[in-house]
Image (cartoon, rainbow, N blue to C red):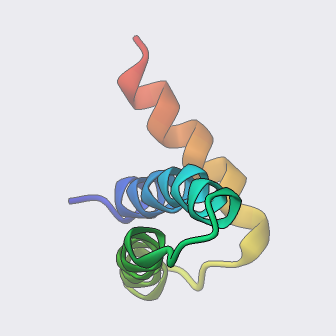
Amino acid sequence: MDTDLILVAGLAVLMLSVPSAVSAFAERRAGWTALVVTVIGAGIFGYGWVNAPPPMTLAEVPHAIIRVLARVIP
């Protein structure tokens, strides 16, 4: 699996944790699901970040997203 795809998948999982966290905060309950999803997303993103062939910088993340979207959308 390509490291760009792993980075984007991790970011997507991290974005999915935001509505769960907001919902838990609004209902004044523990956000365990949001916490677990955040840890999983950060782990996926970190794995893609560490295994990228050239040293990845934060400025290259948007380029990785565009590359993945260019492969997915014909």
Identify the image quadrant of residue 52.
bottom left
User: 43 above or below 29?
Assistant: below
Of residues 53 and 33, the one drawn nearer to the viewer in this rendering: 33
Residue farthest to the front? Answer: 28
User: 41 above or below 2?
Assistant: below
**Residue 8 in sight in this render:** yes
The residue that appears at 35% across and 76% down in the rendered structure is 40
Of residues 40 and 61, the one drawn nearer to the viewer in this rendering: 40
Of residues 55 and 43, the one drawn nearer to the viewer in this rendering: 43
**Residue 52 in sight in this render:** no
Residue farthest to the top? Answer: 74
Percent across and percent down for residue 8 are 47, 54
Name the quarter where the N terminus is drawn: bottom left
Percent across and percent down for residue 28 are 63, 69
Residue farthest to the right? Answer: 59
In this picture, residue 21 sits left or right of residue 36: right
Count the marks.
Answer: 0
